[in-house]
Image (cartoon, rainbow, N blue to C red):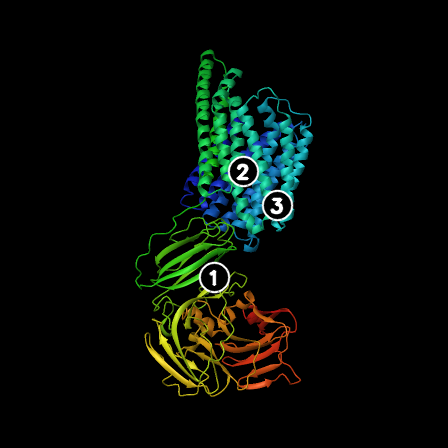
Amino acid sequence: MRARHLAAHAVVAGWAVLTLLAASAQQTLPVARWLAIHLFLLGAATTAIVVWSEHFAVAMLHAELPDRRWSDVRAAGVNLGVVGVLAGVWADLPALTGAGCALLVGAIGAHLVVLVRLGRGALGGRLAPVVGYYRAAAAALIVGAVLGWLLATGRAGPQHHGDLRLAHVHVTLLGWIGLPVLGTLFMLWPTALGVRMPERTTRSARHVLGLTGGGLLTAVAALAAGLRPAAAFGVALYAAGVAVAAVLFARTVRRRPAVSAAAAWALAAALAWLFAGVVADSGLLVTRSVTEAQEPVASLVPVLLVGLVGQILMGALTYLLPVVLASGPKERAALRAVLERGWAVRLAALNLGVVLLALPLPRPAGTGGALLAGAAGAAFRAPVAAVLIRSRRAAGRTAGEDGETGGTGTTGASRRPAAWGTAVGAVLTVLAVLIANSGGGTSGSDDAAGAADSGSGVTRTVDVTLADMRIRPDRIEVDAGTALRLKITNTDSRRHDLKVEDGPATPMLAKGDSRVLDLGPVTADREAWCTLPGHRAAGMTLDIVVHGDTATAGGGYEGHTSAGDTDADADPATGTGDGVDLTADFSAGWRPRAAEPAPAPGGTMHRTELHASQADIEVAPGTTQRMWTFGGTAPGPTLRGKVGDVFEITLVNDDTAMGHGIDFHAGSLAPDRPMRTIEPGERLVYRFRAEKAGAWLYHCSTPPMLQHIGNGMYGAVVIDPPGLRKADHEYVLVSSELYLGTPGSAAQVAKMRRNDPDAWMFNGVAAQYAERPLSVRAGERVRFWVIAAGPRDGIAFHVVGTVFDTVYMEGVHLLRPDDPGGAQVLDLAPAQGGFVETTFPEAGHYAFVDHDMRHAEAGAHGTVEATE
């Protein structure tokens, strides 16, 4: 038995050393903090709980010792499983993580079976109910391991990640750690005080287990199902159980001095932090959503580890080391006096540190609290070392006397090797708990080293958002040699970071925090991801795709791509292969495009200057795309006039990468010169007379027009029919398709050719008028000018809840208000236009859509809000 305990505590000490190393690495690697906590909880704490819960169960049940060989096999299985889990997560090997979890679950399951069998036929005792805490804890670890596997491998999915993460934190911390600690206090508390155990201890232990175990089961099941009120109720039940235990312990306090005041105060403080932690946890679950509760609940973990586990270990060592190491009452008192030297100052410093960690204070206060708690733990190491050295000398003297007299000398010396293993493992564990939580969880530098000058001279900055277990955009395409800068902002309530493969990383970012990463000139594909365990597997990844030798980062000249740009099936630059995320939020400061056209200007000559240029435009909620534009917008500005008016448009090519032209469908003239392509820096005057009324398209005339129109170079010209009556409201809606990706790249062009858009839009932004509805009053007459820009699809324009009484299509009135019939759809092929009129019968919200439902559901929809 002694040899087994020595080996077990050597393992505990080894896990503690690894925890210390991981904790010290957290300043350079964010996942190290996760690793430090799990090294302690899964490594050191799990090994200690498995060994000592079996030992205590035998003692409390007065049962026969189980076969030690199988106990060693179970302990080995636990440690091998832990190694597999931690190595699998660290190296991002889901198969290894799964194998480790399976081995851990098997070993703990076998341990649970042993704990159950020990109770069969055992004599039992007043503390027999405490074994129930160990059994419940084993079941909790099995559930926690399964949940951890789902999270670490991404099988939970982003939609359930937050719920299951909270369930995992609760079942492991309150179940696997909290229940054994609480149960053992029924035995340890009265012995530290030196009082008799109350008669009602057995009954109270059962009641407390019912409350804490039942509450934990309720909370974990509710959290996994996303039921916050039920989860809060379960945690409140757990807190009630802790309160019942605390009342029992308080009633055992007597006026006479305790056997170990230092141990008693440390145990009492630990229990107080457990109660405070679960009460705060219950409050968070009541007042916060699952997403909002993630970070505050996570912040309770280091508080409980330091305030609860750290102090439990310090209190237990203060009482137990003299009992184990001393050979008699006199030596025990002397050793206890050494351990209790300065205990009040240490205890005050540690708990003040926990208070600073727990309160929502500025970061320097939290860092100060961590340092204070760490200093208290380090100060505890000195008296423990003194006690160990003193006891070893006494053991040497005892062994010498036994050698001289021929005695066996087993009373003191034979117990001390196991005691030394216990002490070393426990002290290192205390330090590991404290140091593992002394960092702020941030890592890396704010920025990487500055980028060198790129060979192409092009620098591109991309805004990257971290939220909802996603990185947006999740793909960025650049040309080889482009100097890439990523501006990363976390808009999630949870902390995230971003690590670039073979490149820089951000620190952990709280909500609203931003950092800029300079990658320098990029010449090869890279991946970036959030390093928090399970986040990468759940989908928090970003692909940086590099194309070779295209003219600029904005797109190839005239749409022609290089030989290296061959990934025709690649996802777009700022979206996914499944289209854009229409449930996301538009960026701060975003404004919708005004749909109201300006009235037809006075006079018959209309002069306009249009500048062809490239611009980054938010084309869908949270999705920014490089577009080719007329006037910096896509579509370009709407032009309006009357029949017979003359339009003089000066086209200026400000695009430094390629040539552009323009074609006005409203004009009738030979295209040779006015529609020719002009090179960068050139100007062209295009003059035409609007001889016919209608809703007309204009677009870039430079081949390949599929790409130029598809990347945003189009707009509308409205020529009022003679005698057009006044409407209360007029709106111009230009429908088009959205193809995400680097303009002109092979991947984007392939999507255009196979008619596979990422979204459909009105006025260049998917779903913008669903976010910001058009406003009218009930009973007012509203005219919708509609132009189908394509480049591939037309539109079936429909307003839900109304009937069109006027339809004008391609220069012809198909329906007038005095006609007996009505219309439901304005059906336009690519490049066609017209208008419809209707009135809204009552106040309400009326959706307008492209009635091709694939188009409508992918962005071609909006809302008209009619008020009284």
Alpha carbons under labels 2 and 1: distance apart: 41 Å
Callout 2 touching callout 1 (CB < 8 Å): no
Amino acid marked by disc 3: Val
Residue nearest the observer in this picture, 359 or 522: 359
User: Which residue occupies 42% across, 48% down?
Assistant: 507
Residue nearest the observer in this picture, 389 or 263: 263
Residue 220 - label: 3
Instruction: Identify the residue position indicated by label 2 in the image.
Output: 304
Among numbered discs 1 and 3, the one appearing first in the sequence = 3
- Is 272 located above or below residue 690 in the figure? above
Among numbered discs 2 and 1, the one appearing first in the sequence = 2
- Res. 192 visible in picture: yes
Alpha carbons under labels 1 and 3: distance apart: 40 Å
User: Which residue occupies 45% across, 14% down?
Assistant: 403
- Is 87 located above or below residue 202 in the figure? below
Instruction: Identify the residue position indicated by label 1 in the image.
Output: 589
